[in-house]
Image: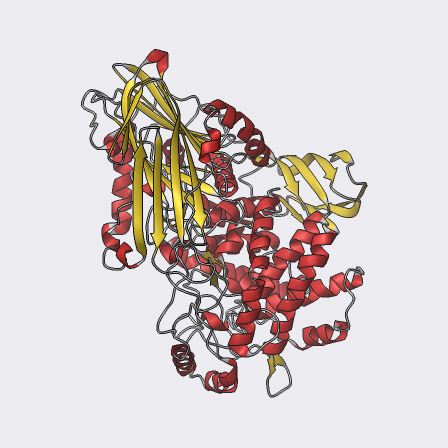
Amino acid sequence: MKTKLQALAIILAVLFTCIKCNSTASTSDPKNIVGDVENLLIEKPAHGYVSNLPATKWEEAMITGNGTIGALVMGFPLKERIILSHEKLFMPENPPTPAPDLGGSLDTFRKLILNGEGEKASALSQELGKKVGIDGMIWTDPLIPACQLEIEVLDNETLLNYSRSVNYETGEAATAWTNKSGLFKRTVFTSRTDGLLATKFEGQDGSTSSIRVRLSQLTHDEEQEDEFDTDDLIEEVIYSAAEEGILKYTTRFIKEWEGSLKAYTVETRVTSCDGTMRSDGDWLYLEDCSELTLLTGISLSYEKPVSTETGISQFTNIDYQALLDRHTPIHKEMFNRFSLSLGGNKDLYKTPMQLIRTSSVGTLNNVLVEELCEAARYILISSTGELPPTLQGIWGGTWRPAWSGDFTQNGNVPSAIASGLNTNFQEVIEAHLDYMWSLMEDFRDNAQDLYGAPGIFVPSRSSSSGKTYHYGEEHPHLFWFAGGAWTAHFFYDYWQYTGDEQFLEEKTIPFMLASAEFLEFILTEDENGELMFLPSYSPEVGPLDKHPLSINATMDIAALKQLLRNLLTLVDQGQLDTDKTGKWKQILGNLPAYAIDETGDLKEWIWPGLKNDNSHRHASHLYPLFYEVDPDFKANPELIEAAKTAIEKRLEYRRGKNGAEMAFGLVQKGLAAAHIQDVDHAYECIDWLCNSYWSPAFTAYHDPGEIFNVDICGGLPAVVTEMIIQSSANDLSLLPALPDQWPEGEVKGVRTRCGITMDLTWKNGKPVSALLKANRNTNFHMHFKDHSWEMELKAGQEQNWIME
């Protein structure tokens, strides 16, 4: 039924697109406004889009963000709603709860699971949770919108045309419309230099309008009424509008504890207006305006008494263009560090909806791939500030975001940041590592409180806290042990890409050692003396027809192998002096070998009798292939073939579901396929990722057409780039997983583990030329199929290379 409704919606959108705005256009319902696709009012930016279609829901809004402040710009000409947000606006709902003591019952858990009684083991964990106050699933504090800036045009004139646009190089979201009085335009951006949101309204050739503006609270979605009541969480909301042109909105929370968010304030100031201004209630009225500028700031208060200062008052004597001029170079430089061309035909511009309609699974339009990689990069940059992107970046139009809109560490976050290093946007990795480092005390407490263990335990979810209390009977997250090792990989990979020795010494090595310390503690031995993970949990699935609380998840074993091998590499390089070398080698030699089942499938649990459940969204058993290929796979072609079979089996159920839920599962499979040169499967993942998970505003979804989510904004460019260039510390591979559909192209700004940044051009499926820029002294081997070149560059050196 849902698929039929989605298809009907697309058909209706197509029909609307064919109709030009005319005198019958509704001015009361902004969703009915459809512009003339052949007469767009905004010039197409060099990077970005122009559309004739308005948003039909907040998930289709235009987005802008400076990483800290974000805005969903609906683009309604007469009744605009700009939904404001802040990267740290996690509503205090669930005070950090002590973790249950599972360590005291670890032997019992192990016996129950070995006896096939995972349900009883999980029930025991629930009972232990109740002893510390955990009764049912407790969620992380949710990321909520701050409020909305409403801008209403009071002139009741019929709209004649309409367009909206996002410029990826400036971060500007623009709305333009015409009526009998002329052309009007509203632009919005969030400044990286000044930490504010700027909004400008202007009428062409002196055309004027009367406008009113206010800050207001978002209403509840109808489906949220039964599960959420702001009266339980919000103490008060204070609105005000002053004749001096100042709007203020302050929310104070009921629940509080040490370090929790107590309140936040949004302030909007009119900094220029050529009309008259007055206030009435919570509205500001601005009459006969041909030009208007609004500046908005957001401040968070963690202490009492609550401060309502936002810093906006210092910007009374600066105009919109001056703010834009000093913001744009920073944002533009970030965006343009990386670019991709796959030889698509861009001679005739197509709006996002037009372009989406040119493509379908099996006939993917290369221009769509290019445009979506740009959109993804823009979203990633716009939602990276002090923190990395959450599930929803920094945006949201609901009080109850899916999964609290948090940082989901068991797959979503790794996908969202996956392109940070190889597409030359290391800021997102730095934000992630800084965030995880800031939670080290919580992670240590988790390990101690849960298991009486040394080291750190990284939970599956976090937001305002790193404490672990989120789990349920069918989701035994407290037994997911790979979180620390997976995070340690990003610390280590940052070192490989940047060569930052201070960061390595101060943060990377300590995080890696703490992760290893916990895993060494949690390991046990089977009756033959082989090490094993018991209990063990593979996100978020169990063996076929069995409880998820199980034995020897392949992910646990792979993550530990990767961690210990990386530590040993640091020892060999002289970066780490330790007496644990022998112990780590002993552990590596005594961990279970990767296993293949009777169907040729890579096993997700390395234990007899446990079979894969392949109708599932995650693919965590492919972890050995997510990044650099595990040496065990390199040495064993049968494991490579088993991985290809595993990818095929996890794609089978998706094919009948338009790609199916959880787009980042396709990122996992795509990365794995690219790294073993499984070209057809890698390309199929790209095909689904591009055709099923994007809105007409080039915002991304978690499921086909549903749930605003940014996971694939890092994941899609990562897979595409890994199909074109792959690297390790000593090797660089050109076009290792290039599909026939991309016979020619160019990529610029790819960073590598070899210490170089590369531009590459190819034709007829073969490299033509490259520009190599050394970020440090480096030597490595460059490969294309059976060709190999030895390369050596000094820091700062650039070398042009032509394949002969």
Residue 598 drawn at (x, y percent): 52, 73
- Looking at the image, which residue is at 34% across and 58% down? 254
Which residue is drawn at the image coordinates 74% and 65% (left, top)?
Answer: 568
Identify the residue shown where x is 64% and y is 58%. Answer: 629
Q: How is the image coloured?
A: secondary structure
Q: Most extreme residue toward the left, as rendered? A: 24
**Is residue 682 shown to the viewer in this render?**
yes
Q: Dividing the picture into quarters, in which one does residue 147 lie? A: top left
- The vertical placement of 452 against 793, above or below, is below
Q: Please tell me how many numbered marks the rendered image carries.
A: 0
Answer whether residue 657 is visible to the viewer in this image: no
Q: Residue at x 36, y 60 (%)?
A: 255
* Residue 577 in the image, given as x and y percentages of width and height: 79, 66
Q: In front: 480, or 345? A: 480
Q: In the image, is 525 to the left or to the right of 233?
A: right
Front in this rendered view, residue 111 or 312: 312
Residue found farthest to the front: 305
Q: Nearer the viewer, residue 265 or 324?
A: 265
Q: Residue 789: horizontal and vertical position, in percent?
A: 78, 44
Q: Quadrant of the C terminus?
A: top right
Look at the picture and state if 589 lies above or below 231: below
468 sits to left or right of 799: left
* Occupied quadrant, residue 333: top right
In the image, residue 493 above or below residue 82: below
Query: Is 661 on the left-hand or right-hand side of 66?
Result: left
Q: Position of residue 540 (x, y in %)?
A: 44, 66
> Extreme top residue here?
205
Q: Quadrant of residue 141?
A: bottom left
